[in-house]
Amino acid sequence: MTAHRRWYCNCSGAQRELVADPYVEEDTLEPTCPLCGATPSSDPKHTINYTDHDDHAD
Ligand SMILES: [Zn+2]
């Protein structure tokens, strides 16, 4: 069973999907908010949330 977790940050007042840059250094592979730089493990303002999507959902 495969699920894709999509991360969002609402620091701007709207849900913005985090982006996972494949070219960043290996130790920063987490998805990152392009606006505030928050990540799922570094979320000082508690603006990060996520939804899980099953493969067959779409
Ligand atoms: Zn943000």
Image (cartoon, grey):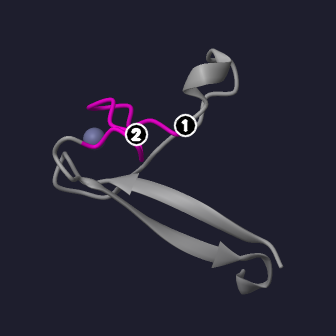
Q: Residues within 10 Å of mark 1 (few under 14, many from 20)?
A: some
Given residues 47 and 44, the one toward you in this image is 44
Circle on res. 19: none
**Would you say residue 28 sits in the magenta stretch?**
no
The x, y position of residue 42, in whole percent, is: 34, 38
Given residues 38 and 19, the one toward you in this image is 38
Q: Secondary structure at mark 1?
A: loop
The picture quadrant for ligand 1 comes to top left
Q: Secondary structure at mark 2?
A: loop
The span picked out in magenta is: 31-43
Given residues 33 and 41, the one toward you in this image is 41
| Residue beneath the point at 16% across and 54% down | 13
Q: Which quadrant of the view contains residue 14?
A: bottom left
Cβ of mark 1 under 8 Å from ligand 1: the answer is no
Q: Where 38 sits versus 9, above or below? A: above
Relative side of 23 to 31, left or right = right
Q: What is the distance, in whole Å, between disc 2 and disc 1 at their CAs?
A: 6 Å
The x, y position of residue 35, in whole percent, is: 29, 32
| Residue beneath the point at 72% across and 80% down | 58
Circle on res. 39: 2
Q: Where 11 sits versus 58, above or below? A: above
| Residue beneath the point at 38% across and 31% down | 34
Residue named by callout 1 = 30
The x, y position of residue 20, in whole percent, is: 59, 36
The x, y position of residue 1, in whole percent, is: 83, 79
Tell which circle, 2 or 1, labels the residue nearer the N-terminal end: 1
What amino acid is found at the position of numbered circle 1 in the picture? Answer: Glu
Assess whether mark 1 and mark 2 are in contact (beta carbons under 8 angstroms).
Answer: yes
Q: Where 15 sits versus 35, above or below? A: below
Relative side of 29 to 55, left or right = left
Relative side of 58 to 33, left or right = right
What amino acid is found at the position of numbered circle 2 in the picture? Answer: Thr
